[in-house]
Amino acid sequence: MYDFIIMVVLFIVGYTAIALEHPLRIDKAASALFLGAVIWSLFALGAANILDLGFSPSWKEVKEIAAQITEHIKPGIDDSSYTSLGWADKVQMSHEPMHFVKYELGHHLIEISEILFFLFGAMTIVEIIDQHNGFKIITDKITTTKAVNLLWIIGFISFFMSAALDNLTTTIVIIALLRKIIADKKTRWLFASIVVLAANAGGAWSPVGDVTTIMLWIGGQVTAGNIILHLIIPSLMTIIIPLAILSFRIKGNIEKPEIKGDEKDYTSASERRYILILGLASLLFVPVFKSVTHLPPYIGMILGLSIMWITTEIIHRKKNPELLKKLVVIQILKRVETPTIFFFLGILLAVAALQTAGHLFLLSEWLNSSTNQNIYVINSSIGLLSSIVDNVPMVASAMGMYSIADTGSVGFMSNFVQDGTFWHLLVYCAGTGGSILIIGSAAGVAAMGLEKIDFIWYLKKISLLALIGYIAGIGTFILQEMII
């Protein structure tokens, strides 16, 4: 029992270190990797005691299958069919907890790797577009100085851009734009905060718009078409309501900063346009690829990346070596946020250990009983918690707590079939709830770092707006589900 409890305590301590990344001056990726490795090590060392508690659903399944196989195999009967189907491994695992732990670790690593390969490919494609100044085509089109008009333009650009890219990249790109068109710091803070709200809302309705949607899409809990169908309107309400409220508060025109003439273009206008179109097409092609081939999404992402890589090699092969240092993919790979990949690896491994050991099963049982199996309360709570705790482990935990139910399930379990109400609402809540506090999402943390936005200022000026939008989106979702 002590081993079981220590795993939870260790996870809490490790996650606290991740949350306090800046005061501790320890990168969250390092803390996450340490956490994932140590929790699995602790699980392996105490596997027999932990599994004997009977809280692990996968261990129970292995024991049941092993018992059935043992009962059916009689002396003198050919048992080759059991061996060829891998059932002999189930019997062995039922007697050797360490063998079970190693098997489960390998199983989870396959699922986690699919997410990481997908993310790495997507991040590289976005970085290729950025290094070729492809986003400049979009940002150069914004010429208005009227505050209200600019607010709505920035909000909707961020909303739809994050659906094609991701909320973190969108925030970085749009804040770079804001620096060129807004001189006043506090006004820029306001607009940057709206970018965070819009980027998180936009990422929630797209299968590639946020890490959490990618996780659930790859995991099979949701499909691309149904995410868009069920969540685009609630997500729109999440940003439209705050924009409408702010429209009554802000007046006048925006003062632009002095233009610096020392910015150097490394690509021609035609190259920027071509790379932007090709990059966005590669990202948007992934759901189509999965639907046609039924292969995992990361294969489609790798295909898109390879096409962009070959294309840029052909375009730049006759340019001078100094220019190639900025534009070729080999150099661009050095700029991709590798620590982010390591962070996801560590945190997903840690959550997988808690799932295998049975901690998440106990948590799901407690949530079901304390909320009277109300999926709206459960998901709304997850969304609110994601404003404090990163939404990736929150969603990973929810995926571990609740399994995909069989088609045709009735009652409470019907909410957990593929594209069930629980999964759609989880995507929305986890994606948008983080906007309530600036530290609650990757987009918020990026904006905070880039613009040095004060936590208390955001709490006073933006948090209530974000909460109103969040509640409006949930209300819209519930109403929409009732009508459907």
Image (cartoon, grey):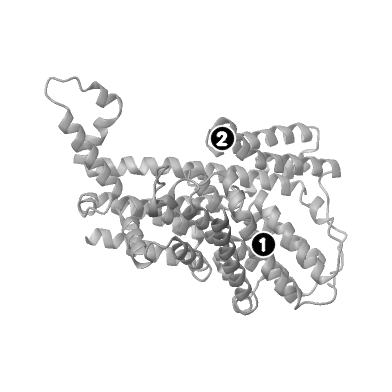
| 378 on left or right of 61 | right
Above or below — where is 113 with respect to 72? below
Return the residue nearer the eye: 386 or 372.
372
Give residue 193's quadrant in the image.
bottom right
User: Is residue 322 visible in the rendered structure shown here?
Assistant: no
Callout 2: 10 Å neighbours few (<14), some, many (20+)?
Answer: some
Mark 1: which amino acid? Answer: Ala
Return the residue nearer the eye: 197 or 231.
231
- Label 1 sits on a secondary structure element that is helix
Q: Which residue is mark 2?
A: 299
Q: Provide residue 130's location: percent of width, then percent of height.
A: 72, 49
User: Is residue 258 visible in the rendered structure shown here?
Assistant: yes
Q: Provide residue 106's location: percent of width, then percent of height.
A: 37, 40
Above or below — where is 246 with respect to 354? below
| 349 on left or right of 66 | right
| CA distance for labels 2 and 1 | 29 Å
Return the residue nearer the eye: 400 or 114.
400
Return the residue nearer the eye: 229 or 470.
229
Q: Provide residue 354's location: percent of width, then percent of height.
A: 35, 55
Q: Nearer the viewer, mark 2 or mark 1?
A: 1
Give residue 463's quadrant in the image.
bottom right
Tell me which label, 2 or 1, sits earlier in the chain. Answer: 1
Above or below — where is 373 with respect to 280? below
Report if the CB atoms under discs 2 and 1 are less than 8 Å apart: no
Image quadrant for the N terminus? Answer: bottom left
Callout 1: 10 Å neighbours few (<14), some, many (20+)?
Answer: many
| 257 on left or right of 337 | right
Q: Residue 198: which numbered mark, if any?
A: 1
Mark 2: which amino acid? Answer: Ile
